[in-house]
Image: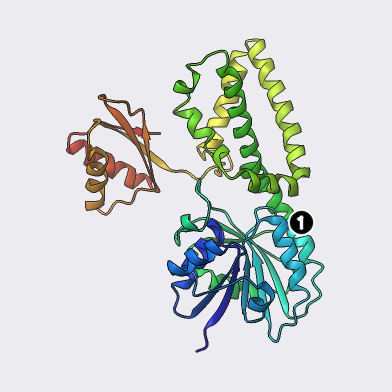
Amino acid sequence: MAKINILVAGLGLIGGSLAKGMAKDKDNHVIGYDLNEDSLKFSLMNGIIHESSTEFAKAAKRADCIILAAPISETISLINEINTIDFNKSVIVSDTASVKSPIMEAAGHLSNEKVTFIGGHPMAGSHKKGVQAAKEHLFENAIYVLSPTKEDSGSKVTALQEILRHTNSKFVVLKPDEHDEMTGVVSHFPHLIASSLVHQAKKWESTHSFLPKLAAGGFRDITRIASSNPKMWQDIFYHNKGKMSVLLEEWIEEMKGLKFLLDNNEKEKMITYLDKAKLYRDGLAESEKGAIPSFYDIYVDISDQAGAIGSVVQLLANENISIKNIEILEVREDITGALRLSFNTKEAQSKSSKLLMAEGYETMIQN
C-alpha cells in the first residue's frame, strides 16, 4: 500500500503537534514546510516530520493532503498559491485557523478542480509556542471543527478525519459563521477581557506596590490566557474584528447593568445574577449544557514537602483512577496547601476521596 504524503505548512505548536502524531503512523509520509530553517532542523532531528522543504509549491505537488498551520494572513496567501499549482492528482487541503470566515472566503475562490478545501480548527493549545512545544496528544478529546466548502464533500471529510485520527479529537462539522460566533464568545473575547484585567492591575500597581504579591489564585487563573502569543492574537482579532466589536458592545452594556446593581445595593438581584452564572458555568442550566463541560473536583490538603503531590497521584494511579486535571492551590512555604483534582465522572470523584481519606488525607468534594 502506497504511503499517504501529508504536507504540514507551518511548524509551530499546532502544526508541529499534528505532524508529530501523523508521523508516528507507518502509512504516512510527513513533509514539513516552514520558512524558519531552525524549526525544520528541529522537526527532522526529533522525528516530528520525515522530510523538510522550503519550497511550498514543489512539496504541495507531491502531497495527498495539505494542512495549512500558518497564521491566518499567511494561510490565505498559501490558499491563493495553491490555486496556481498544476496538481496531477486530487488533494485535500485544510487549515487550523481559529477564525474561519476569511479563510473560507479565500477558499471559495479556488478554481483548481483538483483541490477539495475543508476548513479546520483543532480547539486546543498551550501557553507555550513553537515546534519545540509540540505534543502528539495535544488535541486528545478536544473539539476539532471541520467546515467543508462543498455540500457534497462528505467522503472527503471522512478521508480527512481518517488522516487526523491520531489526534483522538471529537470532530464537529460547523458552518464558518457559526464557528466564528461561538469561538468569539468562548475563546477570542475572553482573551481580550483577560488582557484588560492585567492592564487594570498594572495601573493600580502605581497606587499599591504590594499588589503583584496578591495577584495569585483566581486572578492568575482568569488571566492566564493573556500570556499567549500577542502577534498571533492580533491576527485573530483583526480577522474576527466584526464579531469582537459586537461582543465588546454587549459586554459594556452588561457591565453597566452590573454597576447599577452594585451602586443601588440590589442584593437579591445580585444573588440571582451570580447564581445564574454559577449554574451555567457548572453545567447545570435548564438546558443541561453549561458553558464549560462538567468536571468532578475534590480538594486535598497536602504538606509543603518533597514528593507530597507525587504520593497523592501515585495512590490514585495504583487504583487505575484517571485524573483529568490537577491544580496546586494555596501552597505557601512551611504550611499546608491544597490540590484540586478533577475527574470525568462522579464515581471517580467519590472513589478518589474515600481512598485518600483512608490514607489519612483531608479531602473535600466540590459540589
Residue 121, picture quadrant: bottom right
Q: Is residue 148 left or right of residue 291?
A: right
In this figure, which residue is indicated by the disc labeled 1? 102
Q: Within 10 Å of the Cα at label 1, are there few (<14), some (14-19), or many (20+) other Cα atoms?
A: some
In this picture, is 247 found above or below 171? above
Please tell me which residue is depicted at 78% across the width and 77% down the height of the picture: 112
Question: Would you identify the image quadrant in which residue 57 lies?
Answer: bottom right
Residue farthest along the top direction in this orientation: 264
Give the amino acid at mark 1. Pro
Q: Which percent across, then down, holds residue 150?
A: 75, 70
Circle 1 — which element?
A: helix
The residue that appears at 44% across and 68% down in the rendered structure is 45
Q: What residue appears at the point 67 percent right and 71 percent down from the top-left corner?
A: 93
Q: Nearer the viewer, residue 268 or 185?
A: 185
Image quarter of the C terminus: top left
Which residue: 56% across, 44% down?
289
